[in-house]
Amino acid sequence: MPDYKIAPSILSADFARLGEEVDNVLKSGADIVHFDVMDNHYVPNLTIGPLVCEALRKHGVSAEIDVHLMVKPVDRIIPDFAKAGASYITFHPEASEHIDRTLQLIKGEGCKSGLVFNPATPLDYLTYVMDKVDMVLLMSVNPGFGGQSFIPATLDKLREARKIIDASGRDIRLEIDGGVKVDNIREIAEAGADTFVAGSAIFSAASDSDANVYDTVVKAM
Ligand code: DX5
Ligand code: ZN
């Protein structure tokens, strides 16, 4: 059985009480905090930056924080996220002028690195950089918003990514992001994912039931 990890996306949390929301999902058994950074340029939405990551660390969050950069350019914000306590920093290859350099920058800052693939982006970008990648993140929606529907073609892409990772012999997480729900998480796991981002499925509008929703997601696997 793979070492499955659940990474709630705080994009769907109540930002007015973010620390408490993150504490709740971690107490309920979540493994990683998925931190969506959007710049209203690379993607049509605007969210949170290094100050909020630092605030979560100061609040006492010790779990890994998985910073998903949906920004362009990417390089100049990386050192700030490293200082703010990011564990993983992932970026979209289309948003970097020099992918290998950006990966080196992330590693040089002491973080784990990853490439993020939009639904229509081929996995070819991995070919020459596998030795610098700790995570492959497949988007199963177009980036920018929570609450979208899972794009089914991502299942084949997951199987392809799983083969590439296994052939590399390296310890690389395969993360899926977008439209992950109780009713599809099992087939997503069977296609090869080991790390599951879920935003709207975990942070419900009625926030008091966060823990129950989380339990339901985990039990569906
Ligand atoms: C979308 C973000 C996702 C999003 C997932 O651009 O990268 O992390 O929050 O939300 P759900 O799980 O609601 O699709
Ligand atoms: Zn994300």
Image (spheres, rainbow, N blue to C red):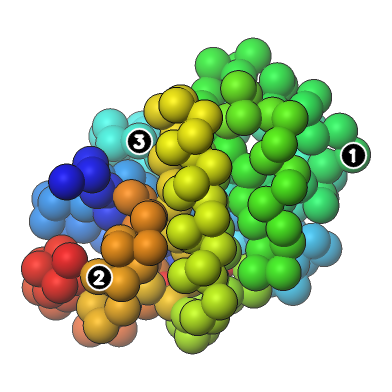
Coordinates of residue 111 in the picture (x, y in percent): 52, 24
For marks 3 and 2, give the one nearer the viewer. Answer: 2
Foreground mark, 3 or 1, reads 1
Contact, mark 3 vs mark 1 (Cβ under 8 Å) = no
Task: Measure the alpha-carbon separation of dots 1 and 2.
Answer: 36 Å
Residue 171 visible in the displayed image: yes
Dot placed on the residue nearer the N-terminal end, 3 or 1: 3
Residue at the spot of label 2: 186
**Labels in figure, total:** 3
Rendered location of residue 49, percent (x, y): 60, 47
Q: Position of residue 158 (x, y in %)?
A: 49, 60
Q: Where is residue 41 in the image (x, y as percent from the top left)?
A: 82, 63
Identify the residue shown where x is 68% and y is 40%: 126
Tell me the amino acid under the disc marked 2: Arg
As shown in the figure, which amino acid type bears the numbered disc 3? Glu
Residue marked by disc 1: 97
Q: How far is mark 3 from mark 1, CA to CA?
A: 27 Å
Residue to which mark 3 is pinned: 64
